[in-house]
Image: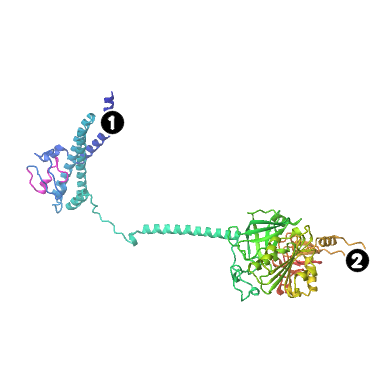
Amino acid sequence: MKLSHTVARRRRLWRPLQLFAVNVLLTASALGQSADEHASHHPGAEPDGPAPTENISGNTSARPQGSTGSPMGEMQHMGAPPRRELYPSLMELRDFTPDTRAELERLARDRMTSGTSLMASGLDKLNAAAPQNNLAVMEQAAAQMRQGVLQFESGIASLHAIASGQAPREIALDWFKQNMDLLPSAEVETPHGIFGLSAFHYSMMFVLVAVSAALLWLNFRKMQRAQVLVARLAGPPEPVALPEEAVQPATQATPSTLSQGELPSRSNAWTGLLRVVRIFEETPKVRTLRLAHPSGGDLPFRHLPGQFVTFTVRPIDSTIKRSYTIASSPTRREYCEVTVKREEHGTVSSFLHNVHEGDTLQVTGPSGNFTFIGEGANNIVLISGGVGITPMMSVVRYLTDRSWPGDIFFVFACRADQDVIYRTELEYLQQRYPNLHLTITANDISRTDWPYVRGSITKEVLAQAIPHLATRRVHLCGPPSMMTALKSMLAELGVPAEQIKTEIFIGRERPVALSRDAEAEAQVDAAKPPSPGDDAPAPSVAVATFARSKRTAVLPPTKTLLEASEDVGVNIEYSCRVGTCGVCKVKLLSGAVSMEVQEALDASDKQNNVILACQAKATADVTVDA
């Protein structure tokens, strides 16, 4: 059973080959003559006899008996002819004649017939040897069938060549090249253009280059937009120039000093985000925020000692701006520091006392003219109270960083000994720099080893701490009541008014006062209603009209025009709120106002009725262009 199963399987495998052979035989019968027809034309021919061999030149090494030796005679033995005797014979023909054409066609068909006979004989042998698994006979049968296929194909090729009208020699040459694996005789198209490329190649290259250029351009535009966004968030530094009044021809720029190209050219030159990198708790109510560029490196702006920056925060539903002086030295390029006291009802100060390291804040600046860089005077007197110490501290840090040789007289007033801001650093700088003279006053002293003045600043304290005071330049910073008292003292001590420069803390966030008792009394007096017997008229309430916005607001005598605008939603830009930056300038169309500070107004502003909204107060109706 196993043997019969194997035989059946082999028969199934050989059936496709048998069908192929039948198709070949049918095709050969349609194209050529039969073996009997061929025998009737060539009596005595031996189709199955041995075939002579032939070399490449076309000469045969053995001929059948009775051959005439002519080219046509060589081509008469097609029974079992050598595979290539037809083509060498064609080399000897110059051209076709009707007789030679007919003879060649007949020989080609005879070749096809002989090939068919070989294939059929081989197929029979293969069918007989396959069931017995006779490998040697099967290989011989396969070789015979391959030879028959080659003869059949050569006959077909000859008929095609004769029908196409090719010359005999061209037919023979094509045969020679084909059998020697040479290239066909067809002419190869000569390349043209640069590098031998066609127009199609050039067009495709142009398309690819255009697409690549478009993609590069799109990527470049994306990078530009990303850079603009980063610039808006982080704010790159702008080119700045030193103001003419601050230039000292003999000054040489060093890495620790501000050079001519480093000083800011205008206020509020930069707006962007800074990151809180360190927080220092100075006193129970005062903290210092160290701010740096979010991506590291130097600050994106330059500032002068004594200038301030403005924070824009949104602690509740509305956006609020508040200004704080930069307390650090401009020589520290990697960061700036602001010191903030937490006021009892201070919205922004409370917000800043709740930020953490790593938070970012929106900052605008620098601004302010309350500066000193060691030029225009060979010594300086710095008097401050409470958080008014911040601009003075920036000046002291800057001058000591530069080893400025002039005398620095620093006088600071606070309420209690635990409220001395920067005390450790100030005492260290005093020990390190003999030209720094430090005086501190406090009213409430809780320790017995207090080395400084007990009480408030008086004329005697100033005269004792600062020799030859009348000849020195004086900077004052503190609340209005303190500034008024100090100006009177300095005038009595012979200090000319033009030698005094002031910075006043005013606005919604109440500054630290020189004396807690005096401030409390001032608040009580301001809030006390007039007595029935008082002849003084009640304060009048004015109306502020904002012409461009078409809105009006109540303007009490104690409220500034800027505060009234905020009450009715009129947007007047501002920064410092102390009258020094000039951002809140508006034009007064009618009425009159009073301004305590006018440092940001020049002669042209005053001539054109330009006022500072953060300082303007009125007791009668006013109209402004806002």
- The percent position of residue 62, horizontal first and vertical second, equals 10, 44
In the rendered image, the vertical position of residue 344 relative to residue 86, given as above or below: below
Mark 2 and mark 1 lie on one chain; the one further toward the N terminus is 1
Relative to residue 200, is residue 102 drawn left or right? left
User: Which residue bears the numbered disc 2?
Assistant: 535
Quick check: marks 2 and 1 in contact, CB under 8 Å?
no
Determine the main secondary structure of the stretch shown in magenta.
loop
How far is disc 2 from disc 1 in space, using C-alphas?
A: 135 Å
Instruction: Using the image, tell me which numbered label, if any, was put on residue 12.
Output: 1
In this rendering, does residue 575 appear at all?
A: no
**Disc 1 on helix, strand or loop?**
helix
Q: Is residue 71 magenta?
A: yes
Residue type, label 1? Arg
Q: Is residue 530 magenta?
A: no
The quarter of the image holding the N terminus is top left
Residue type, label 2? Asp
- The residue at the far top in this view is 1
Magenta part of the protein: which range? Answer: 66-84
Numbered label tally? 2
Q: Quadrant of residue 82?
A: top left
Relative to residue 114, is residue 241 drawn left or right? right
- The percent position of residue 312, horizontal first and vertical second, equals 68, 59
Q: Quadrant of residue 322?
A: bottom right
Q: Nearer the viewer, residue 539 or 455?
A: 455
Relative to residue 170, is residue 269 drawn left or right? right
- The residue at the far right in this view is 533
The quarter of the image holding the C terminus is bottom right
In this rendering, does residue 474 appear at all?
A: yes
- The percent position of residue 581, horizontal first and vertical second, equals 69, 67
Q: Dot 2: within a 10 Å radius of its alpha carbon, few (fewer than 14), some, or many (20 or more) residues?
A: few
**Disc 2 on helix, strand or loop?**
loop
